[in-house]
Image (cartoon, rainbow, N blue to C red):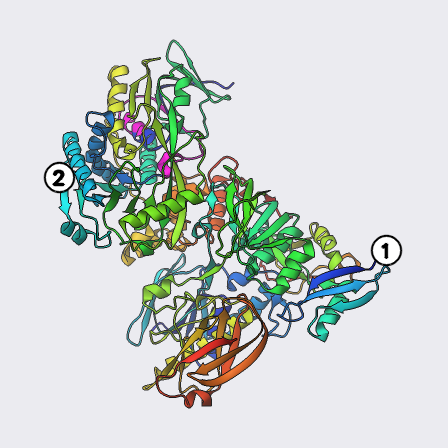
Amino acid sequence: MDYELIVIGGGPAGMAAALEASKNGVKQILILERAETLGGILVQCIHTGFGLHYFGEELSGPEYAGRFVVQVEENPDITVKPDTMVLDIVPGEGSHTVIAVNKADGLLELSCKAVVLAMGCRERPRGALNIAGSRPSGILSAGTAQKYVNLDGYMPGKEVVILGSGDIGLIMARRMTLEGAKVKMCCELMPYSSGLTRNIVQCLDDFGIPLKLSCTVIGVHGRERLEGVTIANVDENRRPIPGTEEYVPCDLLLLSVGLIPENELSRAAGVSMDRVTNGPVVGQDRETDIPGIFACGNVLHVHDLVDFVTLESQQAGKGAAAYIQKGTPAERTFIPTKGVNGVRYVVPQKVDKSAVEPVKLYFRVGEVHKNAQVRVRCGETELVKKRRPRLAPGEMEDLIVKPEQLASLPPNAVLTVEIVK
Amino acid sequence: MPNTVREMICIACPLGCGLKAELSESGEILSVTGNSCKRGDSYARTEITNPTRSFTSTVKLTGGTRPVVSVKSKAPVPKGKMADIAEVLKSVTLPAPVQIGDIALPDAVGTGVDIVVTDRVSAA
Amino acid sequence: MSEQKKYDVAVIGAGVVGALIARELSRSHIRIVWLERCNDVAQGTTKANSAIVHAGFDAKPHSVKARMNVDGNRLMGQVCEELHVPFHRNGSLVVAFTEEEVGTLKSLIARGQENGVPDLRLLSKEELHAMEPNLNADAPAALYAPTGGIVSPYELCIAAAENAVTNGAELRRNYEVKTIDTTEEGFLLSNGAEQIAASLVINAAGVYADKVARMIGDETFTIKPRRGEYLLLDMSMGGVVDKTIFQCPSPMGKGVLITPTVHGNVLIGPSAEDIEDKEDLDTTDAGLRSIQTAVKKSVPGFAIRDVITSFTGLRAHDDKDDFIIGASEANPRFVNVAGIESPGLTAAPAIAKYVARLVSAILDDPPKKADWNPIRPEPLRLREMTPAQRKALIAQNAAYGRIICRCETVSEGEILDAIHAPAGARDIDGVKRRTRAGMGRCQGGFCGTKVLEILSRELGLDPTQVTKFGGESRVLVGKTK
């Protein structure tokens, strides 16, 4: 066996999982990272707002990542291979093989007892949106623009329209403005923003950038470089309303229209996937349905706060450590979880009935609700109920179920998470 | 001159209440409405009297593995000063290597707040 | 004006037709200059079409189209083998949806046989559905053409360009021919800044062929671009059909096709619309939706998801409704290769051979090169290699161990090869078409910045000068500070 644990991805999820596994006694841990440095996407997220929950202070992305990078570097149990791309994961009985490639080692075939999938997510590109029009330069995903501006020191445009009010788009509205660009507007297809309220206030309102709700880009113009876009309001079925078209001159269109977990490796390995989260189906220790393969962070479901990525990944690291040391328990009963009545998904998708610690059920709602109640029930039995002043699709929610509640559940139980009308 | 009303969204919690603050001719706050709790009231008052923000940007780097490095204000700065700070930072250049916490610009535009490096970049 | 250079032949246009012509001409001892107005080859119709190698039952018997189609189909295998271009003879089906359309199929078979298309036959309902189980179960019959195939058009063009340049053709990019003067020795071409003399001109300028012909006073034809919009779907949609599925042509139109691509994606389209603007490559909401509706007629259960991209191609439709290949009436040393719309891709190898014979005749049979090399070496493709091959390659050159495009597993070594190849990549789209970097699910979201960095380094360009596809299509407008 080359390693006890191989962690794929050295962003916040991978680092937290590796550190937690080490803390729980795992000795030979390898992190495979495709970039030159650890830290993942946080390295380019130079704005602050990270760490309020986990560290109790407001850090920038590089600072938040830096705190874990230092720990990883100082940890003798953890080896890091940067600039390394994993090509394949071949699951086996009691041992998995990870195939990767880099310049220094060439092709690597590494065996390990357990794998943590922590590859993160990617941005939804233009093609997936089917915006009509020409194919000029000047159309970028917000994250790509963020890399050019924050890491490379280059401006991808001067007059900007942002499509989608995801957090990266909002953050980039402010960044581009502070770097001297004119951000003309942010268009959001839905009647509400998917970004955090804080970001709408501090990234748009502060700079007088209008947020146009129920509005989308229906056409792009320009042969070589983008010259403008046509925007239009949309009806309740998200179809453009004729007569509301407006031409907006700009040389840069930034897309912030959603994130997709990067699960090509997970799928190729044969891990079962959740069609709503686009991530693997896991238990509360974040183990997938292939024993010894765990998943955490944005590869599992897209998070809005890195603090929760860290917490979730620690569970995965701990779970991996337990698996490495004790293997799979001989007898295990899983209770499936399910989101209904406005709850789009629940992670974990199943809960071990014999859990010894409280289980946090993360979930997302499909629409904005004010002053609502959320609850977990099993059949007609209510296990937890909480009031929430506001529920929004952009903000992840959680409810905690206690071990004794799980233990008392009948066979064939299902944990249902819902909004109470 | 009549009294003026300023509208804003409260970010003290995720509820995002729409606040309305009524201001007198002299700029005195007469009332805050639309809030669901006390925090909304104080948020509105701070936003009107002394709004502050965390400021983040980058500065040029020489001799490093990257051409720029990220920076932030060590404490929130007055909202109105952000553009001035951004302007001053254009002429700041640091030599690599840099560490998290290195001072890029002391006492930014008289705010008393230092602009500090938030990432580590080694020398090329 | 700088000093002018003299050539035997000037080929105008670096689409797939111009590329295969330049390659064929490079067999002879003649000086060839090959002029392209864009920053790369394959920038017009070649980069956006159905990518189909047609069997040849569609064209009107005894037309130039019919002959070139059937000949080109026969030649395609060898050309793609020599140039290492992905080509797959997957066979085509024309599906009838009514008994009336079965009659149309029978006349198509008769027409195909007259054109010399081999092995055409009518499939019964049972045979059809055994062959393509996802097709509309009500379809009563289909025409099966086993010689139909699929090819990567831009790769064919790029490979032919590389091979032509290797064999001595001189490719000049960003050279837009603006005027052509007739001289005693032949022609003087100019882009407004630099003159090029050639004793013979081949006009393979695609949708601009009429404009180029006008430069010597040839007004015998007009090109009216016909716009076609397509949707390219992710590999996860692959396998929905094995053959290229055409809908039976009806008075309502030609119908849309659904086909696998040589890279395992699924392509659907085209919509069809005649337009005036030769640069109008906009996709339209209506066009894209019409394709989605029409394709469901062929495959009712087809769910349009995982769309990678949509694109528009312009087909060089001429008013004569046949290929125009031959010496111009205005000047016998000016050869038009115009109106090469569908099945132009299929016909291209045959057109190239035909034009080369014509040129030979005009230039009094110049001798052939003894050392002409028909082979364009196969580009190294990490993603297609066995682990042992990968290991050996990376040991030899570490650049193949640095993966730049994660979606398509493209290494830095492959990108360097693409940039430094003959007629190599000069922009981001050029790298994409040669290596597939940026062609996957994230559409360059991650690797775009790295490809830009590599282009900047290798070509000695400032990052702000690197373009998506030449001209003003720069990605970065300046430094932040």
Question: Where is residue B2, by image quadrant?
Answer: bottom right
C152 or A365: which is nearer to us? A365
Would residue A294 be counted in the magenta stretch?
A: no
Query: What amino acid type should be assigned to the residue bearing mark 1?
Result: Met
Across and down, in percent, residue A262 comes to 42, 62
Q: Residue flagged by tag 2: what amino acid is it?
A: Asp
Q: Is residue B28 above or below residue C173?
A: below
Label disc, if present, on residue C425 of the rendered structure: none
Chain bearing mark 2: C
Residue lying at 53% horizontally and 82% vertically, measured from the top left: A385
Viewer-proximal residue among B16 and C323: B16
The mark lying in front, picked from 2 and 1, is 1
Q: Residues within 10 Å of mark 2 (few under 14, many from 20)?
A: few
Image: magenta residue range: C21-48
Question: For this view, does B23 lie left or right of residue A252?
Answer: right
- Residue B1 is tagged as 1
Task: Give the left or right position of residue B77, taking residue C292 as reference.
Answer: right
